[in-house]
Amino acid sequence: MNRERRDRPRNRPAPRREYAGRREHAPRRPVPTDPARRAALDVLHAIRERDAYANLVLPELLRERRITGRDAALATELTYGAARAQGLLDAIIAACLDRPLDKVDGAVLDGLRLGAYQLLRTRIPEHAAVTSTVDLVRADAGSHVAGFVNAVLRSVSAKDEETWLAELAPDPTEDPIGSLALRTAHPRWIARAFAEALGDTGAELAAALRADDERPAVHLVARPGEISAEELAAITGGEVAPYSPYGVHLPPSGGDLADSEPIRERLAAVQDEGSQLCALAALAAPAEGPDHRWLDLCAGPGGKAALWGALAASTGATVDAVEKAPHRARLVERAIEGLPVTVHVADGRESGLPGGYDRVLVDAPCTGLGALRRRPEARWRRRPSDVAELTRLQSELLAAAFALLRPGGVLAYVVCSPHLAETEGVVAAAARRARAATLDARELFPGVPQLGDGPYVQLWPHRHGTDAMFCAVLRAPE
Ligand SMILES: C[S@@+](CC[C@H](N)C(=O)[O-])C[C@H]1O[C@@H](n2cnc3c(N)ncnc32)[C@H](O)[C@@H]1O
């Protein structure tokens, strides 16, 4: 079979020229005047080419190109939507090709994803979605790909998402996890990790995966001693959070918060309500003895260190905050300015700090599977093999934390993940090794419903509206 024939989408006339050719041979056209889609496609390129984070690159690019208002909203919807749904879009695009997806040039594939997203998950008319995408890809990869992109997108648009899913998703009675994974655009291994943590492969798993696809509300924390949650809600037009006494929820379209006055004035910061609750739970467990030396062993970028610092200021306690990455330690420095917190750039496994802490927080590096809704591309970037590497690091940090804790001191282990290996698996083994007692963490989350059987707490977006944070609280032996 010649190359042109192999590349051709099924059920469509052959594109005029072979599509996978490289840019060097492609006559470039001026960039079309479609700033929203241009921005979305450039961010998709950055995600694929240099592992960029959409939530960092997009706002910067919008600022640089002065894209505002409806164009900014469209760029955001298309970028986050296409990045989040990548696996589902790829499955549908692949069904329209007669060769493997990985043979498609990366820049062309980004365009196909952007076009397919518009066709399947927005109300943008078919003609506009296809033509605008073809124009953009032509500008990036050359006019010889235009026919190919046009033909694939016309094939995609022949069916709506539901019809595609009926064709492509596994039978839910035979493979409930695989079926839900495709339907909610999650990699299968992540859907399985959620199922194992929930103990469910039916309605609750579906609810958890769907909640993971929604754009989350922005949560603020009102800095204790500076402003109340009620005052912050009144200033920002948000709502007082249901569980954290310091939390405020803003609607998802909250705009660029860095410029908002309470944040500029350091009265408040962006922090998921689940993170606030875990930081507070770590302080709520009775210390049984002195309670003035606190240690945050994985502090960057400083959200919990700042909350601890503000509370320490009112009790006379002090906080040591350890962070391995120098640039993240600088963020901690900024977050804790004026608070009784000392930042140490060090590896938490060998910090060199003198022991005897009354409380230690291990907010460990993790897969972040609990915050996928805030990082659109993350679910497709993480690999199952990341888990083994991270659980090793988490165990070593926990061992170091126990060594730094005084007898009877309190250790809180927190991760932003529901994956059982990095939650219960790691913490149960560490508690056994240290002969630590496991406290019922549910008692430290007052007023929060649906906390399961304990002793650990696993929060969920679909139950609590927070990230899927995990919290275990342990007491070192006397
Ligand atoms: C989940 S984040 C902590 C979030 C932070 N507690 C907050 O609330 O803002 C984990 C942090 O641990 C840092 N880290 C990774 N390995 C570390 C190590 N060996 N020692 C200390 N910090 C480490 C990472 O750079 C990252 O900033």
Image (cartoon, rainbow, N blue to C red):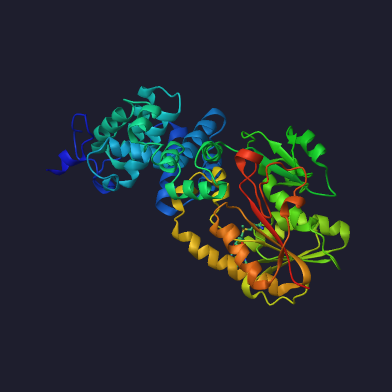
Residue occupying image coordinates x 50% and y 31%:
74
**Residue 394: in sight, yes or no?**
yes
Considering every residue shown, the one lying at the far left of the view is 1
Ligand 1 is found in which quarter of the picture? bottom right
Residue at 59% x, 71% y is 396
Report whether residue 465 is seen: no
Q: Is residue 362 above or below residue 193?
A: below
| Nearer to us in this view, 426 or 314 | 426
Q: Position of residue 34 (x, y in %)?
A: 43, 31
Q: How many marks?
A: 0
Direction from residue 304 to residue 395 in the image, left or right: left
**Snapshot quadrant of residue 329:** bottom right
Query: Which quadrant of the rendered structure holds the N terminus?
Result: top left
- Is 284 displayed left or right of 438 in the figure? right
- Report x, y in % for residue 223: 79, 48
- Residue 194, percent from left and from top: 52, 47
Picture coordinates of residue 424 (x, y %)? 60, 58
242 left or right of 331 in image: right
Q: Residue at x 61, y 41 (%)?
A: 461
Q: Nearer the viewer, residue 19 or 449?
A: 449
Q: Nearer the viewer, residue 442 or 94?
A: 442
Residue in front for this viewpoint, 69 or 127: 127
